[in-house]
Image (cartoon, grey):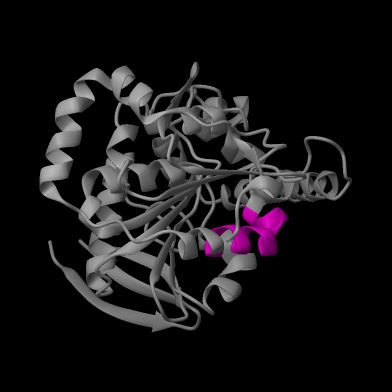
Amino acid sequence: MGCAAEQATGQVRFATVHGHRRAYVRAGSGPALLLLHGLGCDHTTWAPVVESLARRFTVIAPDLLGHGQSAKPRADYSVGGYANGMRDLLALLEIERATVVGHSLGGGVAMQFAYQYPELVERLVLVAPGGFGPEVTAALRVVTTPGFHQVAGLLTLPGLRHVGVHGLRVLAGSGLAGARDLGEVATIFDSMKDARTRTAIRHVARAVVDWRGQIITTSDRAYLTDDIPMCVIWGEQDRVIPAKHAETARTLAPHATVALVPNAGHFPHRDHPQRFVKILGDFVRRTRPAQFDRDEWRAHLRRGGDIELHRAQAGHAPVQPLDHVPTA
């Protein structure tokens, strides 16, 4: 049940946690940043920003279980299970606390991690996160349907896969509205040639989405993050999880900094990496790390019974465009 010793292989390192291999990248020095990718992606989604962030931070970018170069076992692929895995990986790497940055599914994992292990979290940065409303692209709903595994297996046979990947990447570079994110979609589609990856993605998707939309929600627990500095970053042209969820995030967490990034889709850290690094860096510089207090946590839980009253007392401010987010 324990964690084995860490093994490094080139830029990607490997650690065995509870018998399963976990891949991750570690770079830089300073306060820790834990970067959590979205469904079907891996640590490479953060490649445009890792080098810049590593100038100020110790960056840990893992492949979640079932993704990338991490193991793909028959296992617990729930958001809570992922939070447990991140706790154990940080313990193995001797990182006591971190600012947790989560994109899409990783945003839901980051929120769950903060809920389960508030003593380990200094700040939360949520990038187009799941959990702030039911709306989600139909493509993710399809993943949860019967027969997806078999159909995806046919579509990712060598000939069809090459045509599909090429077509998606051509569309991504076309400048067409709504096509911005298709380059990342092409990478996810290409990864599904591996049956274990398809199975893992299906299990993860079913844990967070059904045919009606997102299952997971942060609405009943967001008040617990009042003492954790939070930044929410969303691309204005997001077609996967609509940017209007940023308004919901601001309502549920009225003390959060909310940045809407113009000319960006579901992957603002890839569309505008320098801008993303600046938002994140400015946010960390402006805020003090959260300090966990068990008595305060208890108090939050007690008054959480009347969430609407709690939100009304906290106040509400409108979402601000990126250019209006203070950077001092």
- Image quadrant holding the C terminus, namely bottom right
User: Is residue 236 within the magenta segment?
Assistant: no
Instruction: Pinpoint residue 99: horizontal percent, then vertical percent.
Output: 39, 60
Horizontally, residue 225 falls left or right of residue 206, namely left
Instruction: Pinpoint residue 300: horizontal percent, then vertical percent.
Output: 20, 35
Horizontally, residue 121 falls left or right of residue 127, namely left
Q: Nearer the viewer, residue 69 or 207?
A: 207
What residue is shown at x 23% (from left), y 61% (from top)? 88
Relative to 128, is 72 above or below?
A: below
Horizontally, residue 145 falls left or right of residue 225, namely right
User: Is residue 275 within the magenta segment?
Assistant: yes
Instruction: Pinpoint residue 134: horizontal percent, then vertical percent.
Output: 49, 22
What residue is shown at x 20% (from left), y 61% (from top)? 18
Q: Would you identify the image quadrant in which residue 142 lies?
A: top right
Q: Nearer the viewer, residue 93 or 219?
A: 219
Q: Looking at the image, can residue 52 be seen?
A: yes
Q: What span is in magenta?
A: 269-281
Q: Main secondary structure of the magenta part?
A: helix
Instruction: Pinpoint residue 69: horizontal percent, then vertical percent.
Output: 46, 63
Q: Would you identify the image quadrant in which residue 281 lies?
A: bottom right
Q: Looking at the image, can residue 75 be seen?
A: no
Q: Would you identify the image quadrant in which residue 280 lies?
A: bottom right
Q: Nearer the viewer, residue 163 or 184?
A: 184
- Image quadrant holding the N terminus, namely bottom left
Horizontally, residue 328 falls left or right of residue 251, namely right
What residue is shown at x 88% (from left), y 44% (from top)? 175
How many numbered circles are shown? 0
Relative to 217, is 8 above or below?
A: below
What residue is shown at x 54% (from left), y 25% (from top)? 141
